[in-house]
Each structure stands twice: as structure tokens, then as C-alpha cells.
Image: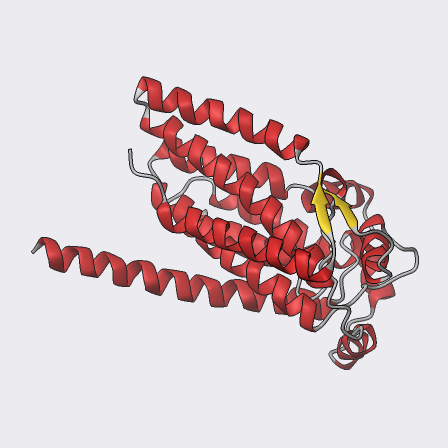
């Protein structure tokens, strides 16, 4: 059994950075009970694969552990970075939307013109967790282990970059009304409490859109010859339609998120190809 050391080092480094940053800012994260419970379930899958020597279950279990830790540490990063409280950039982002001709009201009327689309879009927008679990299990069981590695590394790099950019260019997002995650972001900036309850943390990043970045990455990693490509493509196209409205994002947030995803695809693909060539040269 060979653990994915690079991925675990990355998560450990981000977690350490979170704790140092939080301590410097005078905040603290509390109540780890919920993530620990979920981690214990993923650990059972991992141990089952280890005991029974089933490689697919080993891979599923380890990637589930990685994803759970990844979500936790990067949510903590977003909250800690939001404490920088740099000037809000909503006026500039809204101005860019106007400059490129994106009319939010008109687009909303078009998107919600059909009742079945109106019902489908929030489901698509909320599908990130389900898509992550599906991708992990599907790739492990169908022999596409390289796709699991691609997805995790690309998503991790994109998320770290998203959090850093959001700290430098913070924004609340289009409103009214204020969504719960927008209200949480405002409370952080107002320093309403030095304690942050982990089960209550939400996605508070506006620019760039991480939903958009993940939608692009899901489409890429499910590319042919994977038979899941077309349903995943369709689902994520609906997600991209939902992002500005159910995610309270500016359209420029989507453009930035998509650009970030493409940059991560290029960088990770190049690095993995280079590493593969080095192994082949050593073997020769």
C-alpha cells in the first residue's frame, strides 16, 4: 500500500498555515465533532480495503479521507483570509459585468423562463459533494485512478488560489437579498466573534467562483474514454447556468473561476507528464 504523500503534505501544510494565521488574527476554530465523524466513516472504507486487500476500496477510502480533510482545511483558510478585511471590490466587479454587457435581471428571466429548469438549477448547483463522491468511486472502480489524482490536485491548487485571490479582492456578491453565506462573510468582517464553529462554516468566497472552477474540472476529468462524460457535462452546464443566481456571483466571478481551472489543468497535466517521463527514463 502506497499513500498519496504529496496530497497529504499539501493538506498538512494548509492546515498548519490556517492555525498560524488564525492565532495571529486572534480567532479560533472549534467543534471538530462533525468532520471527525465523517472522517471515521471514510476511515472504515479505507481499513476495509486494507484488510481485504481490495485496491479499489483502498483508493476510495483514501481519497474520501483526502477530500474531507481538503474541504475542512480550505474552509478554515477562507475564514482566516477573510479576516484580512481588505476593501470590498463589489463596485468594480459589478462595473466589469456592465462593461461586458451582462444584465443580471434579463439573464435571470431567461434562465427561469422554464419551470423545470428553475427546479433543476438549484439541484445542479448543490451537486458538488455528490459529484465528488461519485467521481472518486467511479474512477476507482473503473480503473481511472489517474483521473482521481488529476481531479484532487487540480481542485486543491484551484481552491488555495481562490482563497488567496478572494482575500486580496474580497466581495460580498450581488444582493439583496443577502444569502446566509453572504451574511456569514459580513459577520466575519465585523469581527462578531473570535470563535468559529466548524459545522456552521459556509462557502464565503465570491471572486473567483470555485463552483465554476470545479464544474470545469469535473468536465475535464470525465473526458472520453470515460462513459460518464456526457451526463457529467450536462449536469455541470446546468451548474454554470445556476452560479450567478443561486451562488450570488457576478458573471466576472465565473470567467475568473473558469480561467483558474484551465490554468490548473495546464499546470497539473504538465507536471504529471514530466513526472511520468522521468520515471520512464529511470526505468530505461
The percent coordinates of residue 120 (x first, y second) are 73, 41
The percent coordinates of residue 258 (x first, y second) are 58, 64
Residue at image point 37% right, 61% down:
269
Residue at image point 74% right, 57% down:
26
Residue 115 position by quadrant: top right
Q: Residue lying at the far top in this picture: please name it.
A: 52
Position of residue 48 relative to residue 35, above or below, is: above
Q: Residue lying at the far left in this picture: please name it.
A: 284
Q: Is residue 224 visible?
A: no
User: Can you say which quadrant of the picture contains the C terminus?
Assistant: bottom left
Q: Residue lying at the far bottom in this picture: please name it.
A: 99
Give whichever of 199, 57 is nearer the camera: 199
Position of residue 22 relative to residue 122, above or below, is: below
User: Can you say which quadrant of the picture contains the N terminus?
Assistant: top left
Q: Is residue 167 left or right of residue 118?
A: left
Q: Is residue 260 left or right of residue 126?
A: left
Give whichever of 222, 175 is nearer the camera: 175
The percent coordinates of residue 201 (x first, y second) are 74, 45
Q: Is residue 137 visible?
A: yes
The total number of labels drawn is 0
Residue at image point 67% right, 50% down:
239
The percent coordinates of residue 84 (x first, y second) are 73, 68
Q: Is residue 152 left or right of residue 25?
A: left
Residue 280 position by quadrant: bottom left
Position of residue 239 relative to residue 176, above or below, is: above
Amino acid at each position: 500500500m502506497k499513500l498519496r504523500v504529496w496530497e497529504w503534505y499539501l493538506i498538512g501544510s494548509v492546515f498548519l498555515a490556517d492555525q498560524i494565521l488564525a492565532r495571529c488574527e486572534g480567532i479560533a476554530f472549534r467543534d471538530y465533532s462533525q468532520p471527525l465523524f465523517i472522517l471515521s466513516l471514510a476511515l472504515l472504507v479505507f481499513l476495509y480495503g486494507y484488510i481485504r486487500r481490495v485496491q479499489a476500496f483502498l483508493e476510495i477510502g483514501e481519497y474520501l479521507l483526502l477530500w474531507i480533510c481538503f474541504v475542512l482545511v480550505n474552509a478554515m483558510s477562507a475564514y482566516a483570509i477573510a479576516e484580512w478585511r481588505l476593501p470590498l471590490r463589489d463596485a468594480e466587479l459589478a462595473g466589469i459585468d456592465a462593461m461586458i454587457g451582462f444584465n443580471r435581471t434579463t439573464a435571470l428571466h431567461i434562465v427561469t423562463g422554464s419551470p423545470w429548469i428553475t427546479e433543476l438549477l438549484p439541484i445542479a448547483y448543490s451537486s458538488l459533494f455528490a459529484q465528488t463522491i461519485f467521481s472518486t468511486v467511479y474512477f476507482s472502480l473503473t480503473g481511472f485512478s489517474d483521473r482521481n489524482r488529476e481531479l484532487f490536485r487540480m481542485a486543491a491548487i484551484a481552491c488555495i488560489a481562490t482563497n488567496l485571490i478572494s482575500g486580496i479582492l474580497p466581495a460580498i456578491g450581488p444582493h439583496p437579498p443577502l444569502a446566509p453565506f453572504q451574511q456569514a462573510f459580513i459577520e466575519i468582517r465585523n469581527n462578531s466573534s473570535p470563535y468559529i464553529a466548524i459545522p456552521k462554516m459556509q462557502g464565503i468566497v465570491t471572486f473567483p467562483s470555485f463552483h465554476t472552477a470545479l464544474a470545469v474540472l469535473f468536465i475535464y476529468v470525465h473526458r472520453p474514454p470515460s462513459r460518464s462524460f456526457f451526463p457529467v457535462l450536462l449536469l455541470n452546464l446546468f451548474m454554470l447556468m445556476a452560479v450567478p443566481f443561486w451562488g450570488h456571483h457576478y458573471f466576472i466571478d465565473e470567467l475568473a473561476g473558469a480561467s483558474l481551472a484551465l490554468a490548473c489543468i495546464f499546470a497539473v497535466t504538465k507536471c504529471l507528464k514530466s513526472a511520468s517521463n522521468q520515471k520512464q527514463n529511470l526505468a530505461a
